[in-house]
C-alpha cells in the first residue's frame, strides 16, 4: 500500500465554544483617570449575517465593570475588564447530524463561524475608548478541562492540524460490521488552497487482493468548514480497508485511518450514532446483548356506570396511557482504548439508534461509567438509554412504498463573493442562502423555508466566476512585511557562518472584509508562524568568512568600516561603539548618549543599532556589550582576530579596543 506524503501547509487556530472564550479589554488610562468609579466596559460580538456571508451583524453586547486594582509591593496595576463570550457564540452555532443512509460527502454549515469583537469604555456615560479586535474563528467543540490550559491555543493548529487528524478520538484502527456506514469529519482550517476532497480507499479483500478506489469526491470546498465523509463497507468480500483524503492535486491532506471489517454473523448488533465532544458524529456498533424495557404511565378516570350495574360496565377507565422505552445495551470484550473512548458517548448531547428506516433519538441514562481499570486488559460495559419520545400506541409496520407529492426546488436568495483560505476574494460569486419554491409555478412553499446553500445538498447552486469578485477587489489587503527573523541558520557548511533569514509576506497576501487592521494582523500571524529555527535553517544566509569581508569600491580615505554580528538579538539591539568623552562636543558612534537629542551638533553619529557603516580614524574607540548570558566578544581587524573578551550577562561590559583601526581598515565585531 502506497501512502502519499502529507501536503505542506499550516493550520489556522479556532476557539472552542464548549470551553471558555475570554476577551480582555485593557484598563483605560490607568495613570490619567484617578477616580475610576464611573468607568463602564462593553464588548460587542459580531458574526456573519448568514452562512459564508461577508457582511456582519451584532450578535450581542456584554457589559462589565473593571477588575479591582492589583497591588504588588509598591506597584499598582489595573487589569481592565474580562468578558466570557463562549455561551453567546455556542448558542448561535449548530452541529449537523448525517442523513440516514447518507452516501455522499456533506458539509456542516453552522458549526464554524468567523467573529470579531469591539471593546468600548465609557466614563460617566461618555464613550472614551473603542478598539476592534482581530477577527477569529469559533467552532462548536470542546476538550476536557484538564487539557484546556495547555491546548486552548494549539489544539487545532498542532494536535489536529499538525497530523491532519479527523475530528474524532476513535482509535486509529477500528472494528466495524460489514455494511456499516462509518462517518469521518474533516476541518479545512488550512492555508493551502483545497478546492476538492477525494476519499481514497485501499481495500484488502478476503482472498488477499488489494483494490484501490476513490468512492467519494466533492468539489467546491471552502476553507474553515467541516465536511462529513461516509465510509461504506457493503462488499461481502472486504476484509479490511484504509482510507484518507486527497486534494484536487491528488496530494494527501489527512491522516490514514484503518478499519477491520467484521464479516461473520453477529447474533447481537446495535448501531449507535452520537455527537462527540468535537461537535461531529461518530458511529459505534455494540456487539453485546441488548434488551428493551417499557415503563407505562396511565391516567385513570372515574365514570358513572348507570343504575343497571351491568357486569361489563367499567367505573374506572384509562383516560391516557404513555410509555417510556428503555434500551440496555452492552459491548463485547474490547480493548482499553475502546472502553475509554466510550466516555465520549456519555458526554454526547445527541445520540441516535440506527434502525431499518431512520435514526431514533436516545437519551443516555447511565450516571456512572468506568472508563479505565488497572486490572483490565479487555473489558465489557453495559449502558442504558431511553428513547426521547414517549409512546402512546403500538405498531410494528413494514417500510411503506414512496408516495408522490408536488415537486419543489430551491432558488437563490442571497449572494456574496467567495473567500479563499487567506481571506481574499477568489473570483467566484457564491449563493449563500436558498428559498424553497414549487417548480410548477415558482411560488414559495408555505410556511416559508430558507436554508444555507451547502455543497452536496439538494438544490445546491454552484458559484459563478465574475470580475466583481477578483482578489484585487477584496476590500482590505495586507501590507508588505519584510524583516529578519530572530533565529540564526545552523546548517551552514565549514567556513561559513549562519545569518538571519529575512521573512517576507508580500503585500496583498492576506485579505479581510472587516478592516485594514484585520488584514495586517493576519499577515503578522503568518510572519510569526514562519519565524522558526526550521525556517532559518532553510532560508537563512550563509556568510563566507564574515570577519574578512570586502567593501565594494573600497573604504573611504581617513576612515574605517565596521560590521557586527551576533546570534543574540538582544545584544544587537543594545550594543554599540563610540569615541570621546562627555563634554568634548564631538562623540562619533551609535550609542544612545551620542545621539543629537543628547548632544547637539554631532557628526559621524548613527542611529542606535546601526552597523555596516564607516567612522573616522581616532586615537581611542570603545565598545559596549549587552548580553543575556555569559558570551564571548571578539574583535577582528582586516580578518585577523585581535581581541577576545568574556562578557557577563549585565549592562556593565565596557571594552577599550587594544588596537585602533587605521585608514582603510575593516573592523568586525562578533558576540558568540
Image (cartoon, helix red, strand yellow):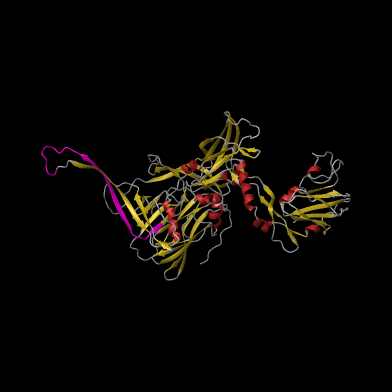
Camera-nearest residue between 582 and 525:
582
Residue that protrudes farthest toward the bottom in the picture: 207
Where residue 75 sits in the image (x, y, percent)? 65, 39
Q: Is residue 394 visible?
A: yes
Whether residue 37 is in magenta: the answer is no
Q: Is residue 103 visible?
A: no
Where residue 138 sits in the image (x, y, percent)? 52, 46
Q: Is residue 536 left or right of residue 623?
A: left
Camera-nearest residue between 166 and 20:
20
Q: Is residue 326 left or right of residue 556?
A: left
Q: How many marks?
A: 0
Where residue 467 sits in the image (x, y, percent)? 57, 45
Q: Is residue 512 above or below residue 103?
A: above
Residue that protrudes farthest toward the left in the picture: 308
Residue at image position (81%, 58%) is: 548
Where residue 208 sits in the image (x, y, percent)? 44, 71
Camera-nearest residue between 471 and 540:
540
Whether residue 300 is in magenta: the answer is yes
Camera-nearest residue between 138 and 383:
383
Q: Is residue 506 left or right of residue 651?
A: left
- Rendering quarter of residue 66: top right
Q: Quadrant of the C terminus?
A: bottom right
- Rendering quarter of residue 585: top right
In the image, the segment drawn in magenta is 284-312
Q: Is residue 544 above or below residue 322?
A: below
Amino acid at each position: 500500500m502506497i501512502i502519499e506524503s502529507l501536503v505542506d501547509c499550516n493550520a489556522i487556530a479556532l476557539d472552542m465554544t464548549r470551553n471558555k472564550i475570554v476577551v480582555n479589554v485593557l484598563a483605560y488610562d490607568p495613570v490619567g483617570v484617578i477616580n475610576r468609579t464611573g468607568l463602564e466596559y462593553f464588548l460587542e460580538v459580531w458574526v456573519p449575517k448568514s452562512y459564508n456571508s461577508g457582511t456582519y451583524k451584532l450578535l450581542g453586547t456584554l457589559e462589565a465593570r473593571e477588575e479591582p486594582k492589583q497591588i504588588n509591593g509598591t506597584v499598582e496595576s489595573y487589569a481592565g475588564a474580562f468578558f466570557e463570550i463562549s455561551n453567546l457564540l455556542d448558542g448561535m452555532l449548530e452541529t449537523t447530524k448525517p442523513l440516514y443512509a447518507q452516501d455522499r460527502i456533506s458539509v456542516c454549515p453552522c458549526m464554524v463561524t468567523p467573529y470579531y469583537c469591539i471593546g468600548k469604555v465609557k466614563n460617566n456615560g461618555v464613550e472614551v475608548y473603542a478598539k476592534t479586535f482581530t477577527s477569529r474563528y469559533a467552532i462548536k467543540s470542546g476538550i476536557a478541562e484538564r487539557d484546556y490550559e495547555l491546548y486552548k491555543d494549539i489544539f487545532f493548529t498542532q494536535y489536529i492540524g499538525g497530523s491532519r487528524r479527523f475530528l474524532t478520538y476513535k482509535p486509529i484502527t477500528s472494528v466495524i460490521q460489514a455494511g456499516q456506514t462509518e462517518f469521518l469529519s474533516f476541518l479545512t482550517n488550512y492555508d493551502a488552497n483545497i478546492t476538492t476532497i477525494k476519499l481514497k480507499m485501499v481495500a484488502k479483500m478476503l482472498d488477499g487482493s488489494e483494490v484501490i478506489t476513490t468512492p467519494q469526491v466533492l468539489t467546491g470546498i471552502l476553507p474553515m468548514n467541516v465536511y462529513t465523509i461516509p465510509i461504506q463497507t457493503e462488499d461481502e468480500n472486504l476484509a479490511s480497508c484504509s482510507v484518507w483524503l486527497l486534494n484536487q492535486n491528488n496530494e494527501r491532506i489527512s491522516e490514514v485511518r484503518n478499519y477491520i471489517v467484521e464479516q461473520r454473523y453477529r447474533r447481537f448488533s446495535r448501531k449507535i450514532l452520537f455527537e462527540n465532544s468535537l461537535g461531529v458524529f461518530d458511529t459505534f456498533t455494540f456487539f453485546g446483548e441488548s434488551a428493551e424495557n417499557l415503563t407505562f404511565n396511565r391516567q385513570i378516570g372515574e365514570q358513572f356506570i348507570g343504575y343497571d350495574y351491568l357486569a361489563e360496565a367499567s367505573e374506572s377507565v384509562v383516560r391516557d396511557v404513555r410509555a417510556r422505552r428503555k434500551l440496555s445495551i452492552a459491548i463485547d470484550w474490547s480493548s482499553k482504548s475502546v472502553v475509554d473512548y466510550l466516555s465520549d458517548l456519555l458526554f454526547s448531547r445527541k445520540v441516535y439508534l440506527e434502525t431499518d428506516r431512520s435514526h431514533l433519538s436516545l437519551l443516555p441514562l447511565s450516571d456512572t461509567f468506568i472508563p479505565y481499570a488497572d486490572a483490565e486488559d479487555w473489558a465489557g460495559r453495559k449502558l442504558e438509554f431511553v428513547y426521547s419520545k414517549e409512546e402512546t400506541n403500538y405498531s410494528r409496520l413494514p417500510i411503506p412504498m414512496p408516495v408522490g407529492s408536488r415537486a419543489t426546488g430551491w432558488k437563490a436568495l442571497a449572494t456574496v463573493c467567495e473567500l479563499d483560505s487567506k481571506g481574499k476574494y477568489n473570483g467566484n460569486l457564491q449563493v449563500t442562502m436558498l428559498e424553497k419554491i414549487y417548480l410548477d409555478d415558482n411560488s414559495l412553499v408555505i410556511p416559508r423555508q430558507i436554508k444555507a446553500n451547502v455543497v452536496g445538498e439538494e438544490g445546491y447552486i454552484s458559484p459563478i466566476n465574475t470580475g466583481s469578485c477578483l482578489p484585487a477587489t477584496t476590500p482590505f489587503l495586507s501590507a508588505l512585511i519584510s524583516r529578519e527573523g530572530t533565529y540564526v541558520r545552523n546548517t551552514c557548511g565549514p567556513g561559513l557562518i549562519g545569518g538571519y533569514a529575512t521573512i517576507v509576506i508580500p503585500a496583498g497576501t492576506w485579505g479581510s472584509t472587516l478592516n485594514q487592521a484585520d488584514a495586517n494582523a493576519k499577515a503578522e500571524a503568518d510572519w510569526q508562524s514562519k519565524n522558526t529555527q526550521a525556517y532559518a535553517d532553510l532560508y537563512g544566509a550563509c556568510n563566507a568568512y564574515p570577519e574578512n569581508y570586502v567593501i565594494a569600491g573600497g573604504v573611504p580615505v581617513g576612515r574605517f568600516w565596521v560590521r557586527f554580528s551576533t546570534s543574540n538579538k538582544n545584544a544587537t539591539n543594545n550594543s554599540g561603539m563610540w569615541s570621546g568623552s562627555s563634554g568634548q562636543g564631538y562623540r562619533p558612534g551609535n550609542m544612545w548618549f551620542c545621539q543629537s537629542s543628547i548632544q547637539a551638533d554631532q557628526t559621524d553619529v548613527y542611529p542606535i543599532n546601526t552597523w555596516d557603516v564607516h567612522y573616522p580614524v581616532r586615537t581611542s574607540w570603545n565598545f559596549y556589550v549587552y548580553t543575556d548570558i555569559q558570551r564571548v566578544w571578539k574583535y577582528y581587524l582586516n580578518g585577523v582576530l585581535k581581541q577576545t573578551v568574556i562578557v557577563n550577562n549585565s549592562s556593565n561590559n565596557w571594552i577599550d579596543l587594544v588596537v585602533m583601526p587605521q585608514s582603510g581598515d575593516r573592523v568586525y565585531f562578533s558576540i558568540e
